[in-house]
Structure formats: structure tokens, C-alpha cells
Amino acid sequence: MKKTLILFFLLVGFHAVQAQENELTWHTNFEKAMQLSVKEKKPLMLFFTGSDWCGWCIRLQKEVFHKSEFAAWAKDKVILVELDFPRKKQLEPSMQQQNYGLQNALQVRGYPTIWFVTAEKKDDGKINLSQLGSTGYVAGGPEAWLTGANQILANFKKG
């Protein structure tokens, strides 16, 4: 009985550590994500989503973004930014303004839309976005989605 309990707790502990390793940081503050992007010399991956109503957004998260293949790729390649447009919950006004500003700047018309960009803050405080490319939901799981993302990121040159 003791050995069974010890084995059980070891397995639970192992899975908890493994789950933590697969967790990704999705930034919601564009300014902070931009600073991290410059520091780490990685492009930004901007995920425009309707988290509580967009079926394709939810499907993309389940089929791709919550998979270990995506987590490993993202940690190495991009800074993740989630720009949410929920219907059931209210975002802070500053967050709402940020998200709508980026949506307008990149002319996002549907969800999910994922833009890969680099950002540069000018001396006057304005931000220049250089578009690398965009995508959305792609059937076929992480492998199919990552193939397209890697084609877009092939244009990225580390500074």
C-alpha cells in the first residue's frame, strides 16, 4: 500500500512538472511584449481572438496552441501576444484601446487572425510594425500550422 501511494505521488509530481514546462506566457500588454521582443530578438506573434465566442479561435487553441509541439516551437521562435475581443466579459479600457488600435493598424477583419510582426519604437514614441505575414486556423494540427508559420518566419532576420 505504501509503495503504491509513493508511486502515485511520484507520477502526479512528474506530470505537474511536465505540465509547467509546456506552459507558455501569453502577453496581453503589447508594450511589455514589444520590449521583450527587442531584448530576445524574436518576432511578435499577435493572436487576435474572440476568446469567449469565436469557435474557430477556440478550436485553434485546442488543436494547436495547447499542444507540446507548439509550446516547444513558440518558446524558441516568438513572443506570444493575445489580443482578445470578448463579448461576455469586459476588458479594461486601456486594454480595449490597445487591442482595437492594433486591430485597425493591421486591418484585422476576422478571427482568429495571427500576425507575425517586428516592432520598433521611434524617438517620438510612435511604434512602427513590420509585417512578416499572417495566418489563421489551419486544419491538420500543430504540424500543419507550424509549417505555415515557419514559412512566414523564414523572412525574419535576427537583428
Image: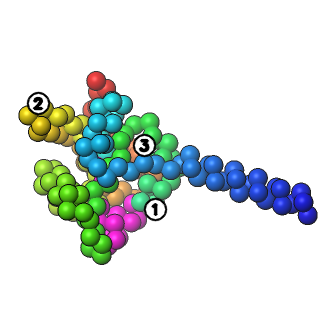
Answer whether labels 3 and 2 touch (C-beta < 8 Å): no
- Amino acid on which the number 2 mark rests in the picture: Asp
> Which span of residues is magenta-colored?
46-60
Give the quadrant of residue 153: top left
To which residue does mark 3 refer? Answer: 74
- Amino acid on which the number 3 mark rests in the picture: Ala
If the image is split into quadrants, where does the C terminus sit? top left
Give the quadrant of residue 64: bottom left
Tell me where residue 71 appears, x and y as whole percent.
48, 47
- Amino acid on which the number 1 mark rests in the picture: Lys
Task: Pick whichever, 104 or 32, lies toward us.
Answer: 32
Residue 123: image tag: 2
Left or right: residue 55 versus residue 31 is right
Can residue 143 be seen in the rendering of this structure? no
To which residue does mark 1 refer? Answer: 62
Answer whether labels 3 and 1 touch (C-beta < 8 Å): no
Tell me the element at label 1. helix
